[in-house]
Image (tube, helix red, strand yellow):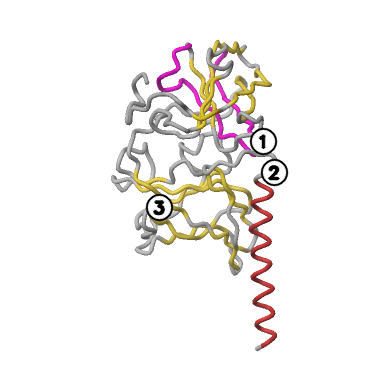
Amino acid sequence: MHNRLVLFRLALVAGLVTLLSACQTAAPQGAAQLECAQWTGGYVDGQGRTGLQGQVVLKEGGAPLAGAFVNVYPDTISNLLGPSQFISSPTDAAGRYRIEVPPGTYYVVARKRLSGQPTGPLEPGDFYSEHQRIMVRVETGRFALVDLPVAVMKAPMFFKTRVVDRETATGIRGVLVDAAGKPVMGGFAMAYADPEMKRLPDFASTLSDEQGRFTIYLPAGGTYFLAARIHAWDMPSPGEPYGKYGGATATAVTVATDRFVDGIRIEMAPFTGTYQPGKSKRPF
């Protein structure tokens, strides 16, 4: 009995070390910490299989959500808004899911559309993982444990179909930082063809990584004005990190076809504009 207790305590400590090391790896010293970008840890023996499993629950109240789909992305090219490489079967009555995927690092989100469809644009009333970007490492022969809280979408998606779904030879690369110069993880940059930036963007970047790095893939060269934010729906709300390249007066960036402009740095600060709910398709 004593030996079993010792083994249990050792396993518990090992699990905590795994979780803490994952968080530290994902958020290096000096990185800006945002609610929308986090790693998760914890594993169970897959008995020869590899993948993810967990529960989808409501953020408010914690009740399980049946009929939700879990989407697994290997990268952020589509900003986690387009089709995913892997998708689970609908969650059961207890909100549980289990999906097999190859070993690797993934971004995981959960969605439930009122239409019952596994894919398609999200609409107000649907359930989704808000702006959280859950990252996980899947290891051979084990199932990573990933629970996903979801909320009801109250406003239209800001991007709609204006997301990148493939790499191109033309674009813009840079970093997102906060006022202290620390990298902002889990945000994205937006490109507009004109300086009137109070509308849907023409193009959006990949999600910024641990170093705040982003890439905007473009179909062709041109002149663009850039902004950055966190949420992918509605207009920016007070306090949401937001910024423009060039500061208060946006600076144009000229891109040549089949070339990348590098070294763009966008500083983000709490948004102080006037918020009007549901105005993502109109000037704000």
- 45 shown above or below 163: below
Residue at 48% in and 60% down: 54
Q: CA distance from mark 3 to mark 2?
A: 27 Å
Does the magenta run of residues contain 217? yes
**Circle 3 SS class:** loop
How many numbered discs, if any? 3
> 153 left or right of 136?
left
Give the amino acid type for the residue marked by disc 3 in the picture: Lys
**Circle 1 SS class:** loop
Labelled pair 3, 1 in contact (Cβ < 8 Å):
no
> 229 left or right of 42?
left
Q: Quadrant of residue 48?
A: bottom right
How crowded is the residue under tag 3: few (<14 C-alpha within 10 Å), some, or many (20+)? Answer: some
Residue at 64% in and 63% down: 16
- 168 shown above or below 151: above
- What is the magenta range? 195-221
The residue nearer to you, when weighing 27 against 86, is 27
Residue under numbered circle 2: 28
Q: CA distance from mark 2 to mark 1?
A: 8 Å
Q: Nearer the N terminus, badge 3 or badge 2?
A: 2
Q: Which mark is residue 211?
A: 1
The residue nearer to you, when weighing 89 against 97, is 97
